[in-house]
Amino acid sequence: MKVIKLGGSLSYGDDLPQCLQTIANLPETVVIVPGGGAFADQVRMAQHNWQFDDATAHAMAILAMQQMALLLQSLAKSLPIADSVAAIRQQANPHMIWSPKLPELDAAGIEASWDVTSDSLAAWLAGELAADELVLVKSATIDSKQSIAELAELGIIDGAFCRLVEHARYPIKILNADDFNGAL
């Protein structure tokens, strides 16, 4: 099983439909983790404007991921949405979209912070599912020579990701959408 996180920034360009088509052609089971995209950007702006706490922003950012899951499903109607680890395990379809539930993440002790974005949630999910591989697909240019720590320093991946994958038993790929569509 692969966990593939499609960065929310992909929703600003033309790569998203091709990424979904690439995933649909993969022979193995795939769980897609959506980024928050423009919906999460609105949460960031609202928090800046209204100065509400990180716990509220975190809950709103999870809702942003849920909105992106609906967007992805509208572009790839054959992909069902699974909203929990248990639902993923029970899913008959080999390709699905994860729409995380806040209570499950809270029960797992996921930090309510902007250091934890969909990147880290994808890493957490990959660990929970004992995934064979984690792939993060970004709109940013990715230098394959850069380490995960360097990518975090550049803000390409979130700050908590390095901690979450420190003892990961699955390989991690971080790819630009063009590389993803051409590589798999």
Image (spheres, rainbow, N blue to C red):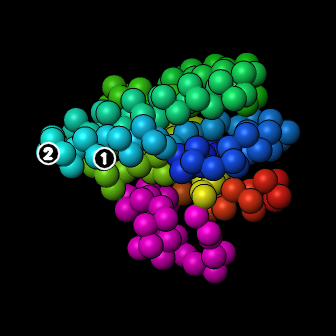
Above/below status of 126 relative to 65: below
Position of 53 compared to 166: left or right? left
Give amino acid for label 1.
Arg
How many angstroms separate mark 1 from mark 2 (CA)? 10 Å
Q: Residue at x 47, y 61 (%)?
A: 157
One can see residue 161 in this view: yes
| Label at residue 129 | none
Q: Which residues are magenta?
A: 140-167
Q: Is residue 124 magenta?
A: no
The numbered dot on residue 44 is 1
| Helix, strand or loop status at disc 1 | helix
Image coordinates of residue 178 in percent, x first then y, are 74, 59
Q: Between residues 168 and 172, which one lies in front from this camera angle?
A: 172
Viewed as shown, does residue 121 lie left or right of 80? Answer: left
Marks 2 and 1: in contact by CB < 8 Å?
no
Q: Secondary structure at mark 2?
A: loop
Q: Residue at x 49, y 51 (%)?
A: 119
Q: Position of residue 38 (x, y in %)?
A: 45, 42
Left or right: 8 in relation to 135: left
Q: Residues within 10 Å of mark 2 (few under 14, many from 20)?
A: few
**Residue with the mark numbered 2:** 51
Q: Main secondary structure of the magenta part?
A: loop
Residue 8 x, y percent position in the rendering: 53, 46
Q: Is residue 24 shown left or right of residue 89?
A: right
